[in-house]
Image (spheres, rainbow, N blue to C red):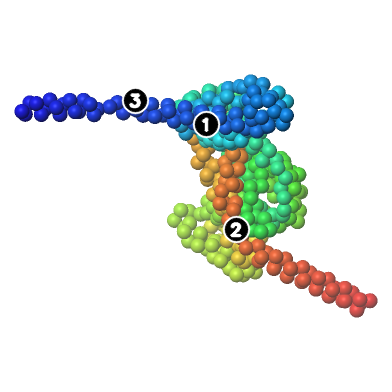
Amino acid sequence: MSSLTNEQTTASNDVIQVNQEQIRNHVEDVVRASVEETLNGLLDAEADQLCQAKKYERSDARKDTRAGSYQRKLHTKAGEVNLKVPRLRSLPFETQIIERYRRRESSVEESLMEMYLAGVSVRRVEDITEALWGSRVSPSTVSQLNQKLYERIEQWRNQPIEGEFPYVFLDGIWLKRSWGGEVKNVAVLVAIGVDREGFRHILGVCEGAKEDTESWRGFLRHLKSRGLKGVQLVTSDKCLGLVESLAEFYPEASWQRCVVHWYRNVLSAVPLGKRRQVAAMLKAIHAQEDREAARKKADDVITKLREMKLNQAADTVVNGLTEVLSYMSFPHEHWVRIRTNNPLERIMQEIRRRTRVVGAFPDGNSALMLVAARLRYVAGTRWGQRRYLDMDRLRELETKNATEKISVGVNEENSTSSRT
């Protein structure tokens, strides 16, 4: 009896066991075939609607006739399907299905481009596409996609700058490129700005052979030709040739030397054991309530530095004091965010992180494209959609200054008349 039960159990197990893999494949094939049949049915229905008659139907309302079809593959969640896209003899056949496919294709293309520009090798891109979409993308396809991306980036990089930007931040980043078998440096110059509503924008990015006068002049010319105007304050490090070029293109704008970079320059002439004390003294200058108080505090700091036998550091403070107090002519509520280049430095850190995996670029244009691609991505995130400054404070200050200027002019005119 026991042996009979075991035999029955074994037989039952044999009956119940199925090949799960075969069932899964069969279901996938059925779903894929169903999706393919449905999409082709929709294409035929759209063609009938355009022709105002079904295939082979005789009708006085007919506007066009069929002219065969062509094959097109479409990647769907159910897998790759074959579409039979109808051709019409005279009317153009524009289907919403193909439009949806094109938009999805565009998103796939952008993903491939970003992977490549982020430093992923072509072989790795091929492996990723095979894992995600079931088909490999050839190196020539990646190259073609990059050309499309370069065109879009160039269009974005050269689009007109609309509106006014009272605050502008400038900086450059050094990248490596291969040149004649040698690895050399190439500079990429970047500008961001805060508009009259308080939002940040990526204003421009250009390649510079190096951060010198000619490079900055070319970059500022590029910004001005695209419409950058209303600049009141430019914040940057003391780059070679930048200040001179700024005076040429934006003579009415003030220049603010980045306070953090200035601190580093001063502290580089201070022994390690005294840097904490000197740093506190420098910060006390910028903790004052106005420019006059800051200058008085700076005089005390200079005297103290000379007493500490730190003459080189004292000279650096004397030479750069005016350059690091320009921000005090603007609203007090803006001081913390306009006296340093930190708004741009954070973006530069992200760019360095993304370019580090590349190593040396094949040329300067590739470096420029990767930086521009990342900046374009940043511009579309919350970074550019969040209000950075309350610009009502600047408008109030502008109104106050205009009123005082008119008052001074009237007083001078009355004084002249009385003397006459």
Q: Earlier in the sequence, mark 2 or mark 1?
A: 1
Q: Is residue 350 visible?
A: yes
Q: What's the amino acid at mark 3?
A: Gln
Say which residue label 1 marks.
Answer: 38
Point 54% across, 34% down: residue: 108
Residue 56, image x and y in percent?
A: 64, 23
Say which residue label 3 marks.
Answer: 22
Circles 2 and 3: CB atoms closer than 8 Å: no
Q: In terms of secondary structure, where does tag 2 sit?
A: loop
Q: Quadrant of the C terminus?
A: bottom right
Q: What's the amino acid at mark 2?
A: Arg
Q: Quadrant of residue 39?
A: top right
> As drawn, is 22 to the left or to the right of 43?
left
Circles 2 and 1: CB atoms closer than 8 Å: no
Q: CA distance from mark 2 to mark 3?
A: 57 Å
Q: Is residue 414 above or below residue 298?
A: below
Residue 302, image x and y in percent?
A: 58, 62
Q: CA distance from mark 3 to mark 1?
A: 24 Å
Point 69% across, 68% down: residue: 396
Q: Earlier in the sequence, mark 3 or mark 1?
A: 3
